[in-house]
Amino acid sequence: MPDPKNILMNQASVKTLSLKDLSFQRNEKFLFSNISLTLESGDILQILGQNGSGKTTLLRLISTALRPYSGEIIWQGKNVNDIRESYLEDVLFLGHQPGLKRLLSAEENLVWWRRLNKTNLSKNVNAFEEVGLYNHKDEPCNYLSVGQLKRAALARLYVSEAKLWILDEPFTSIDKEFSIKLKSLIVSHLKRGGIVVLATHQDLKIENMKYFSISDLSGATSE
Amino acid sequence: MNNIGFLAILRRDLLLAVRYRGDLANPLIFFFIVIALIPLGLTPDSKELSEIAPGMLWITALLASLLSLDGLFKDDFADGTLEQIIILPQPLYFMVLAKTIVHWVVTGLPLSLLAPVLGLMLSLPETGYLPLMLSLLIGTAILSLIGSVGAALTLPLNKEGILLSLIVIPFYMPVLIFGSNMVVLAVDGLSIASPLAIMGALLALSLLISPYVTSCALRLSIYG
């Protein structure tokens, strides 16, 4: 007998992301073809693959920055091309580059990003305490080290209200201590009913982690 | 809802323009130097200078605006903020429009305001000052809008300078023709209504179309 309270919660807040027969072509060669998978609230997917195998491309497809060659991305039962704006309100995408303006301070960058994403503007200070940049938040990003830049970019995770996190190599160039913190942040996002898709070469050892390896499909060829 | 992103980009880019003051001055210095050299290189005779003044001022302003184009999206592309802008839950049209407006505010607007001073150096008759400013105000806005399409198309290339010029200069020609024609007519004491009307129509048209074309070009360019 399932817990009725649990069912109620599920109906209200469970999110589902499915990829249906997703293919992508570059220079007339398939990077990957016919990827199908489904993720629900609380799921985390790690994308594996050699350098250049198309991990970043797959993440960009899921974030709608790139259009697939064929196939569909389904969010809450609807094709994301039809509900692009409401889908993107649920998405947080962090790419390779930190996406920070070098002449603005870390805080100015975060405020700008939050204005664009319409998130509540009152929690900045906490975010920089969490990522350990509180004393540097007013310096131009020019003065920050590579690791600090990454931390400044990751500060968005602490203020975002997005359900689906798409993270491209979030663990590169940050130290061990912050890696542990980031991992626990990801776990707590999953517990709140979020979904995480990430590309990383690290073994994260998170419970119920799903894996998808692009290199499995390296035999896929263009016809 | 749309203007939240529009205003955020407008504010950030203006702030960045103030912090990159050096870049801001480049087109103005170029404009000033070329105009200052003309009397030295061609002729100091004020009658001859006043005849070529409208065209010279317009050509130099056009080149100054063209010079500053290639930075329009380059920095945002390099540091990853363009990627963030493209996947915002808002239409890209308004974001691109905001960036183009800032480009005009930091190049076209100061060029237009400086133009009468340089007109004085070329012995432009006084009756030409206001029409010169007016034609440049409208004209440089059109140049920024058209130029944004070229800047977006050539974004992934490393040496975009020549290609960018080749793409946008043909579209710049009507603006140059009607813009300088407006000043010539005013100096001759004739009505400027018809070139003004055509410039206004060109501005309306490019305001409507070019941010849209630029956003499509950006989506194509950004991941090659």
Image: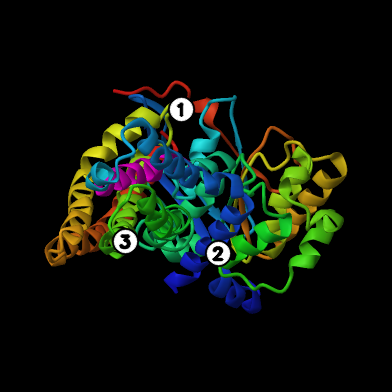
User: Which span of residues is magenta-colored?
Assistant: B53-72
Against A202, residue B93 (above or below) is below
Q: Is residue B220 visible?
A: no
Numbered label attached to residue B158: 1
- How many residues crowd around disc 1 within 10 Å: few (fewer than 14), some, or many (20 or more)? few
Residue sitting nearer the eye, A61 or B196: B196
Q: Which residue is denoted by mark 2 in the rendering? A: B11
Quadrant that contains the C terminus of chain B: top left
Examine the structure image and report whether residue B55 is included in the region drawn in magenta: yes
Read off the chain for label 1: B
| Amino acid under disc 2 | Arg
- Mark 1 or mark 3, whichever is nearer to me: 3
Q: Which residue is denoted by mark 3 in the rendering? A: B129
Quadrant in which residue B163 is drawn: top left
Q: Secondary structure at mark 1?
A: loop
Examine the structure image and report whether residue A36 is included in the region drawn in magenta: no
Residue sitting nearer the eye, B61 or A95: B61
Quadrant in which residue B91 is drawn: bottom left
Answer left or right for B195 relative to A70: left
Image position, residue B82 (x, y; %): 50, 48
